[in-house]
Image (cartoon, rainbow, N blue to C red):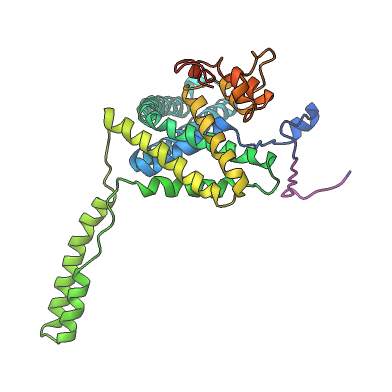
Amino acid sequence: EIVLNNSFKLFMQTKLSNPHYPPEIQAECTIINFTVTEDGLEDQLLFLVVKLERLDLAKKKSELIKQQNEFKVTLAHLEALLLEKLANAEGDILDDTELILSLEEAKKTSDEVKEKVVVAQETELKINETSEFYRPTGARGSLLFFQLMSLCNMHTFYKYSLDAYLMVVTRAVNSVTLRKPKEVKEEVKVDETTEAEGGEDEEGDEEDAEDEVAEEAAPEEEEEEEIIELTGKELKLRVDLLQNIITLFVWNYTRRGLLDSDKLTVVSMMCMNILVRAGKITAEEKETLIRCPPDPTPPVMPENARSWLSETQWAQLKTLENMEAFKKGGQLTQNI
């Protein structure tokens, strides 16, 4: 056996996405899974967008989480205190006045904490309902990130960092922010000109300038923290704008590192995945557009098309004609 210091800690990592360990190792270790999933990234991006759009909701959410953790610690401390007092009680418990008073005080505190927990849960529910309106932006951002992660199948040097991606999304949202920019202080310039002129009563002027600057600072802080609440149709249009601007920024960020021969392929993949997620096309239709398997029994190709169409291309056109989107305007080959 090896004698180890009490503060010794061992950290190990594995590239396995879902490792399996024996029960005895599971009991001795704390296993943390850092794998990024699409749903997990969607929630992370949702919180980021809400923080940038509705800072008041993000602050309340953080405060509620901190408050609920404190409630849990308080309840656990009360339970431990009660168990300790009961275990150390001697003689008849009913005759121990101090113990009875402690139990009553603990029960009162526990009831108050439980009431606050109920209020906090109701507030959190309202915050989540408002935040859910911005979920399409998180879903779009998550979809695009995993699209970028799959580009390594095209070429090994297509690698993207999650931290850099979060910065791109942040810049995208800030580019269309509804917050008013902070105004530049003009009173300071006035003070400098008066000092250059060498006016009298400099001390009185400085005090007046400080008062004016202090008065000016208060509305600036209020203006900086001003929150614009949108509802109904305005909120829906805002969410649509955020989705589009995030898509544009991600594409501009991605295309700078793509080979020219891959740009059309990547943007087509992005477009198709967005259409599939929106329900405008099905996954089967997307696969057909990408692979387009030839029709096994195509009709005879017209003679006037043989000079510019191959037999395989003709069979692929017949496959596309079976898709619902190409049935509306008539057959693709009707005018050939």
Q: Is residue 188 visible?
A: yes
Q: Is residue 316 above or below residue 184?
A: above
Q: Residue placed at 64% from the left, 47% from the top?
A: 159
Query: Viewer-proximal residue, 149 or 3?
Result: 149
Which residue of the protein is positioned furthest toward the front in this rendering?
Answer: 303
Indicate the quadrant containing the C terminus: top left, top right, bottom left or bottom right: top right
Q: Residue reaching furthest right? A: 1
Image point 45% across, 38% down: which residue? 47
Q: Is residue 3 magenta?
A: yes
* Residue 245 falls within the magenta-colored stretch: no
Report the side of 152 relative to 282 (left or right): right
Left or right of 294: which side holds 48?
Answer: left
Name the one closer to the observer, 198 or 310.
Answer: 310
What secondary structure do most residues of the magenta stretch adopt?
loop
Image quadrant of residue 201?
bottom left
Towards the viewer: 189 or 245: 245
User: At which x and y percent is residue 320?
Assistant: 57, 20
- Residue at 50% over, 33% down: 43
- Horizontal arrangement in the rendering, residue 326 relative to residue 301 (left or right): left
Residue most toward the bottom?
198
Percent position of residue 208, x then y: 14, 71
What residue range appears in magenta? 2-14
Q: Position of residue 245 (x, y in %)?
A: 41, 42
Residue visible at 33% across and 41% down in the picture: 56
In percent of width and height, residue 124 lies at 39, 29
